[in-house]
Image (cartoon, rainbow, N blue to C red):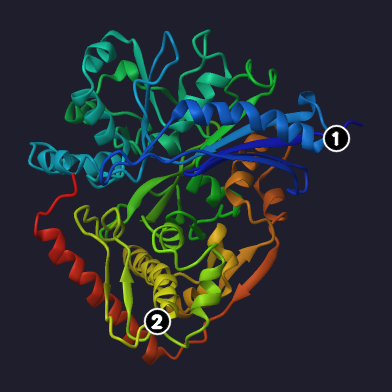
Amino acid sequence: MVQRFVMAIDQGTTSTRCILFDHNARLVSVAQREHRQHHPRPGWVEQDAVEIWRNVDRIMPQALRDAGISADQVAALGITNQRETAVVWDRHTGVPVGRAITWEDIRTESLIAELEARPGIDQVRDRCGLPLATYFSAPKLKWLLDNVSGLRDRAERGDVLFGTMDSWLIWNLTGGVHGGLHVTDVTNASRTMLMNLSTQKWDPELLAFFDIPQQMLPEIRPSTEIRGRTVRVVPGIEIAAALGDQQAALFGQTCFAKGDTKCTYGTGSFLLMNTGNTLVRSQHGLLTTIGYQLGGEPATYALEGSIAVTGSLVQWFRDNLGLIHTAPEIETLARTVKDNGGCYIVPAFSGLFAPHWLPRARGLVVGLTSYITKGHLARAALEATAWQTREVVDAMNADLGVPAQRLRVDGGMTADHLLMQFIADVLDVPVMRPLVAETVSLGAAYAAGLAVGYWPDLEGLRRNWHLAARWTPQMDPAHRDEEYANWKRAVELTFAWAKSGRKTN
């Protein structure tokens, strides 16, 4: 019998990967290519969608070659992607109207202020579950329509299409200008501010509020559903699933039960809790979002705490400050000191996300004295990720009235044992990392495999989850409380900067 595999395309913030998994969820091969980040102005972050598509064109065949298999051995393809990043392209030529505006971009800061004063603002969050923020897709799309000459007319004529990266890749893979499918899934749609969380459809009131022509939007489909076959790159593979990257990680971590919680530590960090079929509206600064939808079943909801800067703070240490040469060196540097020396870093490079949602906040370092060394700064940088996680978990506990019992973690930063121990210490709960580290890609593969019967059910996927590492709390409670109070005082200093009204563009 010919062995079959499931393919995942993981289109991330800094690179795109194609991974093949076998029936036991073992990684068979991986091909990866990075893409450029463009910063044409302060606060602007862009990507070339054509460059990303060309990378997919290269890595899909490479993954097959490296595994020594043919396309007919691929049972299904699942796609996962950086969320909120907005792409607009011409449906007749396939050419983007400009670079994609990424989720980190804050050019819409002044637009957000204008929208906050509009009638109907109180209904926006009730309908989409999201606060009005630069983070999400709708303000980016409105900015493009308002600032790119002739674009609104083209959109109203139906000549241009909008999508997040999943839509862009699926459209290209299924034919592009020659009949490509213009679709998205509920998880990505739930990040645009244009989908009604209750109906899982584009909301007329939200479209009117943001002044978005519906004809440019993709069709919303469940996360696991046969979407068609690839006709480009590697023809004949069934595209069976799509999920936003953090929902894919929730799925890959097999957080299928209400209350299951995971946090992915990457460029930013994203903590999601499965709330089942219950739509929980946060009162403490979290996002209500779709976790996933399996075929025709009711949607599974989630609460999310989004942290803008975690891994990118380590990159800043490396690339901008030159204090380390490689990202893993930050743990070694941090271990040269026993504590942070009274120094705290609040990395509000793109404002503060959950639970504060202050786009005008900016990063700061406090507690500097002549005693502080680069080791103390490195430790403070790692601790910033842990304290931001604590803020999100506190908000989640307050919303649900039930404290979290454990946290499943994934992402590149989980290789840092000092950081993982500190997270367990400040949360006062066990932190657990699975054997398969590629949970985002694995979640996309799981969803696609379920759609075509490669894996029979969720219980079978649970049995594939195996513990690789576990960290348990060790910090003295009084010390934890003192350090958390210091962190919160540091965060409050960014509030004053936010209120000053200073802008970066």
* Residue corresponding to mark 1: 3
Residue 447, given in percent of the width and then of the height, sits at 61, 39
Q: Can you say which quadrant of the picture contains the C terminus?
A: top left
Instruction: Give the residue displayed 27% in from the left and 11% down from the top.
Output: 154
Rendering quarter of residue 370: bottom left
Rendering quarter of residue 238: top right
Q: Secondary structure at mark 2?
A: loop
- One can see residue 221 in this view: no
Instruction: Give the residue displayed 41% in from the left and 67% down from the top.
Output: 385
Instruction: Give the residue displayed 24% in from the left and 47% down from the top.
Output: 131
Q: Is 241 left or right of 27, judged from the image as shown? A: left
Residue 69, given in percent of the width and then of the height, sits at 82, 31
- One can see residue 98 in this view: yes
Q: Secondary structure at mark 1?
A: loop
Q: Nearer the viewer, residue 360 or 306?
A: 360
Amino acid type shown at disc 1: Gln
Residue 158, given in percent of the width and then of the height, sits at 32, 10
Instruction: Give the residue displayed 55% in from the left and 69% down from the top.
Output: 329
Q: In front of the other: label 2 or label 1?
A: 2
* Residue corresponding to mark 2: 373
